[in-house]
Amino acid sequence: MARINQNYDKLGASYLFAEISRRAKAFAEKNPGVELLRLGIGDTTLPLAPTVVAGLRAGAEKLGAAETYTGYGDYEGEKWMREAIASVYRERGVNLDVSEIFVSDGAKSDSSNIQSIFSSDAVVAIQDPAYPVYVDSNVMAGRTGAYDPARQQYQGIIYMPCTEANGFFPELPGQKVDLVYLCSPNNPTGAVATHAQLSLFVEYARARKAVIVFDAAYSTFIRDPSLPQSIYEIPGARSCAIELNSFSKTAGFTGVRLGWAVVPKELTCEATPPGKLNAMWYRRQSTFFNGPSNVVQAGGAAALTPRGREECRAIVDHYLESARIIREGFTLAGLTCFGGTNAPYVWARTPGGMSSWDFFDKLLREAHVVTTPGSGFGPSGEGYVRLSAFGRRSDTERAVAAVRAALGKR
C-alpha cells in the first residue's frame, strides 16, 4: 500500500506567494476594471540584456547544425560555464576550483535540494524572517515537529530573530545546531551582512562542525565595496559554508532559470572528511539532475562576459533606483522603512501596530497595490510588509503615489 509523506501535512498554510495571488485575484474579480499595481513578488520585468539574448540565440543555433550539436552536458554544468563563474569569484579574492562549482536551474532549487545531503535529524537554524523555501523544505524533509499557529513557528526549528534592535541580522544560536541558513542581501528585510557579522557565524560553525547555507542570490546589488558579496571573503568559510547564487535577479533569468552552488572540497561536518560533502552533492546532482539547459548556460556565460556584465549592471542599477523611489516614497507616506540600499527590497513597518495581512488588505483595498505581508516570512516578520523594486518603473511610481494618497500623505 502506497503511503504519502505525512510531513507535507505539517505545512502551516499555503505557500506565501500563492496566497497573495489568491487574494489579489479575488479582489480583482470583485472589482472589475480596477488596475492592480504590484510591489509584491520579486519577479523581474526588464528585458534580457542584448548580449545575453545573443548568447542564448547562439546557443540555440549551435544545436541546429550537426557539426556543433551537443546532447547531455556535464551534470555539474559545462566546464566553460563553471570557469566563467570562478573568474567572477577571483575578482573578490576568492579562488575556487571548477570542481567545487555546480551549475543548476536556480538558487531556489538548490536551497531546498541541498538539505538532502545532511542527516534527517539535523538541527536547523534559520534567519527569521526568511525566504519561505528554507523552512518549508526542511519541514517536508521531516526535520521539524508540528506547526504552532499561535507562535507561527515549527517545533524543532531554531528561529534566529532579525529585528530592528539587532539591525535585522541575527545573534548566534544559543545552542549547538547543525545547519544554519543565512541570506545576504537578505530577502525580505534588505539587510546586508558585514564582514564582522559573518565572521562570527563562521567561527561558530567551525567550532561546532556546523554548515552554513549562504544564499547570495542578490549579491550583485551590493554597491558598498566594504560589504562582502561572498561568504568566502571571510577567512575559514571554505571549511564550513555552502554558497548559493543565481542569475535570476542579476541577469533577469527568473523564467530562464540558471544558478549555481559552491560546495568547497575543504567543507566538513561532524565525522565527515574534507571532500565528502562535495562528492555527495555531485552524486545527488548526477542522480536527480541532468545538468542545466545547454542553451541557457550559453546565455549565462554571455552574461558574465565584460560586455554582458556591464549591461546586467545597468539593469541592476535600474532596480536599485526603483528601490530608492519606494523607500523614499513610503517614508514620505509616514512609514518607517529599512533596506532598499544595496538590496532590491524595502522592509516597511506597518502603521499603528497593524498586522501584516491587515495592512496588505488595506493597501490592496484602498490603493490597489499588492505588497508582501512580512508575517509570511516568519514570526519576526509580523508588523512589516516587503516591497519589491522589480516592477516596471512607471508602475512603481504610480504605486508609491497611490499608497501616499491612501495614507493621506500626498
Image (cartoon, rainbow, N blue to C red):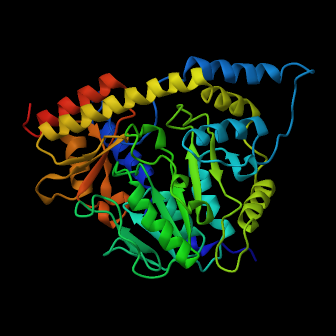
Q: Position of residue 226 (x, y in %)?
A: 39, 45
Quadrant position of residue 147: bottom left
Residue drawn at x 54%, y 42% as measured from the top left: 92
Residue 408 lies left or right of residue 214; in this view the side is: left
Residue 178 visible in image: no
In the foreground, 132 or 202: 202
Q: What quarter of the picture does the C terminus occupy?
A: top left
Residue 209 lies left or right of residue 371; in this view the side is: right
In the foreground, 77 or 85: 85
Label tally: 0
Q: Is residue 386 above or below residue 213?
A: above
Residue drawn at x 88%, y 23% as measured from the top left: 68
Q: Position of residue 352 (x, y in %)?
A: 10, 56
Q: Is residue 62 above or below residue 282?
A: above
Residue 147 lies left or right of residue 333; in this view the side is: right
Residue drawn at x 35%, y 73% as measured from the top left: 149
Q: What quarter of the picture does the N terminus occupy?
A: bottom right
Quadrant position of residue 210: bottom right
Residue 399 visible in image: yes
Q: Is residue 29 above or below residue 359?
A: above
